[in-house]
Each structure stands twice: as C-alpha cells, then as structure tokens.
Image (cartoon, rainbow, N blue to C red):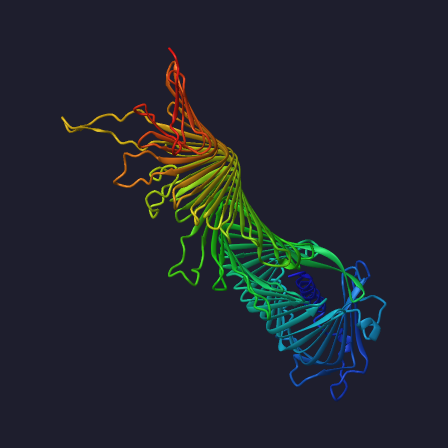
Amino acid sequence: MRRASFFLAFAVVLISVFVGITYSIRRAHAHKLRPPSVALKPTEDGIAPQGWKYDKDDPQTNRPVVRLYAASFRLTNNPSVFELHGLALKLFNKKDANYTYIKADKALYDERSEVMTSDGPVSIVMNVPVGKDAENKDELAKRVQVQTSGVTYETKTLKAWTNQPANFVFPNGSGKAVGVEYDPNTKILHMKSQVVLDRNGMHVETGDLIYNEAEQKIYLTPWSKLQRQTMTIQAQKSVVTLIDQKIHQIDSDQPSGVDDRKGRHVEYAADRMTASFDEDGNMTEIVGSPHARVVSFQERAKTVLTGDRADLHFDQEDKTRDGKDAVDSYLSSVTAEGHAIAESSPIEQPGVTPSETRIMRSEQINLDMKPGGKEVQEIYTPSKAQLEFKPNRPEQVHRIIDASKMRIMYGEHSYVDTFHGWNVATHTDKPPTPDQKKPPSPALTWSDEMVAKFVPNSSDVDRIEQTGNFRYQEGARNASSKKAILEQKINRITLVDHAKVSDDTGFTSGNLIVMNQNSGDMDVTGKVLSVRAPDKNQKPGTSMLDQTQPLQAKADQMQSRENNFLVFYEGNVVMWQGANRITADKIEINRDDQILHASGDVVSELVDNKQPAADTATDKSVPPPSPVYTTVKAPDLLYHDDTREALYTGGVTLLRNAMTVTSKELRAFLTPKTDDNKDQSSLDHAFANGDLVVLDIIGPNHKRTGSSDRGEYYTKEDKVVLTGGAPQIVDSLRGITKGTLITYYSGDDRLLVQGERGKPAITKMTKK
C-alpha cells in the first residue's frame, strides 16, 4: 500500500454530503417546509401560483439560512400532505460562505407524520460558494455532487434515507451505493450495499458501510476492497478510525493485499491487520497478526516471509504523476515475529540453472528494502536463527546454518551479495557420486563468525570466510584453525593460524593449510607437523624407518599431491618413526612408486631391531642390550621401498658404534621386519664406493683405519670388506696391512687379507 488518501477523501465526502444534507433538512424543518399562511391560498384547482419561493434569514445575524423555490405548490387529497414541484433549495452554513444546493422534480411533505419523500430524482451539490451559481457547468466541476432518488426524511427524528442507488461525483472521482441512511441523533451514516468510491486515484468497494461520526469510525462489512495504482487490499470486516476527520488507522479481518509493479510483485495477508497513517493521510505502517504472510516476487526469485506477527513500515517519496507533484508511500521494511520464516525460492527461467531454495527461521526476522521499495536491501535477525539451503537439482548439496544471529545483504536485482553469521554451526549433506552406493558423511563446521560472498548477479556462493575457533568434521576427517576460507568456484579451502587437518590415518598441522577439494592436493606452510599412522594394508618391510610406529615429520613447508600419494617436505625437515629418523632440507615421498628422496644435509638415524633375549635357565626375558644406531650423513638420499635399498650420494659418512665410514656414495640395504628376522638390525648391509675410508675405534689408544675404492659392510657379522684400488688397513698398534681384498670382523677383531694372484699380502708390524 502506498497511500490511504482514498479513505480520507471518502470520510470527507460522507461527512460533507450527508451531514450537510441533514443539516439542511434540520434548518428547513424549523419552518416545516411550508410557506407562511398568506402564501397558502390555492386556486380553484388546488395549485399555488407559479414561481413560489421562501426565504429565511437568521434574525440575529441577518445571514441567509434557507432559500427555497418551487415551480408550483399543490395540496393533495390528503389535507396533511403537500406536493412541491420543481423544488430548488439552498441551505447555507452558519458562516454563509458556502451553501448546499438541492433539486427535486417532486417532493411530498406529510405534515401529520412530519415525513418528506421524493420518489423521483434528487440532485445535491455540496459547498457552493455564496455568489456562485450551482447550476453553472464550470462551478459544478469543482463541487461534490450527489444523484439519487426515493429519499425519505423524518423531520421529527431528523433521519433521512433512500433504498435507491445513489451516485457521487467529486472533482477527482466518483462513487455510488444502493441504499443510504443517516441519523443525526446518533451521527451514524449507513451505506447499505454495493458501495463503490473512486477518489484521487483510489478505488474502494464494500458490501456495507457505516460511518459513526461520534466515534470517528467507518465500518466496512462484510467485505471490503481497496485499490490504488498498483496496490489492492481485500478483507472481510474493516474499521477505519479518523482523527480530526483525517484517516488515522484501519483494522481489518482476514486481509490480503497485492502490490503489482513492473519487475516486482508483493502480496501480504494475516488473520487481522492494522494500518496506520500520518496526518497527511500517508500510510506509515501495517501490522498483521496472527498468521502474517508477506510474499515478494522479484525477477528470478520468490520470497515468502511468515510469522505470528508482521510489521510493515512505509516511507514516502515525492513523485510527479500526470504532470503533477504527488507523494507515494512505499514499503521500506518488514519485521516478522514469532516463529518467523523467510523462504526464498528460484523462479524457473529458460536457460537458467535454478539455485537452492533458502529458508531462514528465527523468532524475529527483519527485512529492509532499498530506497524506492523495489528491491530487497537486507534480511537480518537479532537472535538465534537457522538458514537452510534446499537443493533444487540432484547435484546440489543440502546445507543448514545455525547462528546466534545472521544477516543477508543484497546487491543489484535482489541477488544475495553477502551472508554474515555469528557463532555459526553448519551441516552439509552431499549427494552420492555415481560410484557411491550411499551418500557420504555430512560435513560439519563451527566458528565464531562466518561471512559468505556471492557471485555478482547470481545465487552462487563465491567465497566463505569463517573466523574464530573454526572446526570441521566430515566422517573421520577433521580440521581446525583460527580462520578458514572456502573459495567455492575452485573448491579450495584455506586454514589460517594454528591450522590442523586429521583423519583416522593421522594429522597435519601448520600455520597455513591450503586444500584443493577437487584434487585432494594440500599445501602447508609454517611450523609443519604431520603424523601418519602405520598403514594396516602395508606389506611387511615397506617402511624405511619403522613400519610399526607412526610416521612423523616436521618442516617449514609441506605439499601433498594425488590423494597423499606424493608428499613433499621442505625447510628444516625432520622425519621419524619411533627412534629412527631422517633430517634434510627436502624430503619427497612417492607412495605409489615406494620412493623416498631426501636432499640437502641429509642425516638418517636407524636403530637396530633387537628384541629382548631369553634366559634359557629361567625361561624369562632379560633386558635387551643398549640400542645400536646407524647414522648416515650425505647431501642426497634416494630410497626404494620395494627393494629396501637406500642410495646416499654426494659424499657420505656412516657412523655405527665406534665405526665411521666415509665414501663418495653408499648403497644401504635395510632388513625387512618379518617374523623370522626380528633380531636383525634395521641396516642389513651396505656397499660404499669412491674414496672409502673406514675408521674403527677399538680402544682408548687403539684405532684401525681402512681405505679402498669400494667396500661392503654387513651388520649381522660386523664384517667389513675392502676392495678396489689399493685396499689397506692401518692399525695404530699392529701396523699396516695391504692386499687386493681385506675382510675385517670388528666384533672379534679378525682380519683376512687376500693378495693378487702370485703376490702375497703385505703386513708391516709396528714395533713396540
């Protein structure tokens, strides 16, 4: 509804016409509509002289009160009844500035019953200025005119009525009704049926109208209809309240309204409705309750707002209509309270993929319109609310957002621009993919605040940002951080500050985690820590470190590709399983090809896989010996898990117990951990090539140094084999031993030397 000036004009017409008529009749009644006795001398046929007239002035002010003219005056067969023909009556108001002009072809007045009737046409012209001719066409166009017939007036009770149609003509409109009655004693005007009024662009219809002047109320029953420009309101019983003859309030039962404009259609309804107006007759508010309902149609969406109560607020704007200045009321805001629901559903259009249906629920929902009232500006709730996204296509997800309060802001063409929620929890159900038998586990999130940005001029989410204690759960997969960002178009999630992602196989944490939901790729930076549980499906002996322990790693950066089959660590990398560990500048893991590649200051530490020994006498286990570590340092490490082979290159140093081995490269073979070799070390044997040097510290003052081009080391026998070049061993106590092949047993201090064919081995003993 934009304006209510119709009701104001309607009330003015009723008051001015009917009150004016009764006022005139009361004034005429004082003289009983009868000329002085000197004028009542009929002719032989009972007809009075032509052009009879009667004037009455106020004796105190000498102002005119009545001017009555009849073309003829006649006595009827009933001596108490007088017949007037060609009646013209002017009834002046108290200040004689205006008069009401009444014409009737014929009128009967019964002096005994004090009733005047006019079966024929009756014409009334309201508020004609003194000195102006009421029958002048130009003057008539400026005045309120009433055309009716069958008028009855009781001069004793001052009641006037007709059961015939009555037509009204206004300077800017018209009206009609069938059956009109006015009682000046109760100041009640009754328009009995088929009431239709048009004024200043407003149209009203009702079955029955009662105006109570004392109460300043207009009652419309059993139905009413109001139209103005693009707006229509229909209701059952309605009550119009006036203040100083101006419309103040309308109360209606079972109202329903429609405002239909280009590009926008609004409907509203409730069990009862109260409309309020300002002193200029402009609508300011509509309150509907219970079962309030407001429906808004935009170009591509339909929004339905319901609640126990709805409060519609209206603003005014100046406009030019038909070349004239005018004021329009437009819907500026709506507040729904009590089980409030706002549902926005897409309108199907050719070539346009429908978005989800959005349903907001709260105890109070507020809707603000943009200036002019054509588009929604925002919808918000001051208290706990829920927003549901219901899919309209099989591939769409079903999402529910719960928040302590929320706000939806709109951009151009009433498309959603931004969603803002506080203390948010989300629940997302995804449809199953073609290869899934049942839907996946729901995705759940929690955060202190959530902001979602939408793609301009669409209903698609572009970016979601959740801040403050963000948590995520989807089946066994969990995530947490202080801030999370979802880029919907590329399906990328970014976790910021104390970020962590976990599932039943382990977790990864860091300062920043970026996950590509489509590919499964993940990038982690800043204080990276990852823990991966042993793979239950992994074959025995397929872990370089310790397959029975979780694989843990620290780094400055981490990348995971191809669903975690490729993992890259960079910057101060430390990887360990139990007591076994590797440090490097970079570590790359290819799970599919079973390859580990470490580079840059590589250090690997492997502990022997020794089990507690058993005391055969008591059949009790005894504490195991102290652990034996094998430490290998090199610029580069390439490990093949299928062959259990680790290749160290770039200048290698191996440390084991008191032994140190250096070479250009070292090929180490790890021992698979199977049930039948539990007592063997993690390092089974190693081959070294290039500038090999073996240093064995035997005692405080005793060391043995071996050198060659190639060498082999077997941990089970503590055996070192030197070959290639010119193998030799220098013993600080025993001297130098040379040969083509030297085998040294560190455990029992045995030395086997083989020379070239035909040449003996050489040993130079140190003199004591």
Q: Find the residue positioned furthest to the top.
A: 768
- Where is residue 406 drawn, in percent x and y? 54, 47
Q: Is residue 62 left or right of residue 570?
A: right
- Where is residue 104 drawn, in percent x and y? 73, 79
Q: Find the residue positioned furthest to the left.
A: 617
476 or 220: nearer the eye? Answer: 476
398 or 12: nearer the eye? Answer: 398
Please tell me whether residue 309 is drawn above or below residue 721 in the rendered image: below
Residue 407 in view (yes/no): yes
Residue 682 sits in which quadrant?
A: top left
Residue 580 sits in which quadrant?
A: top left
94 or 752: nearer the eye? Answer: 752
Q: Find the residue positioned furthest to the right.
A: 131
- Quadrant location, the C terminus: top left
Please tell me whether residue 694 is drawn above or below residue 411 in the rendered image: above
- Where is residue 672 drawn, in percent x and y? 33, 41
Residue for point 71% across, 65% down: 16
Please tell me whether residue 590 is drawn above or below residue 23 in the rendered image: above
Q: Is residue 441 left or right of residue 86?
A: left
Q: Find the residue positioned furthest to the bottom.
A: 45
Residue for point 54% across, 65% down: 237
Residue 311 sits in which quadrant?
A: bottom right
- Quadrant location, the N terminus: bottom right
108 or 148: nearer the eye? Answer: 148
Q: Give the number of callouts.
A: 0
Residue 115 in view (yes/no): no
- Where is residue 42 drawn, in percent x and y? 76, 83
Q: Is residue 747 left or right of residue 85?
A: left
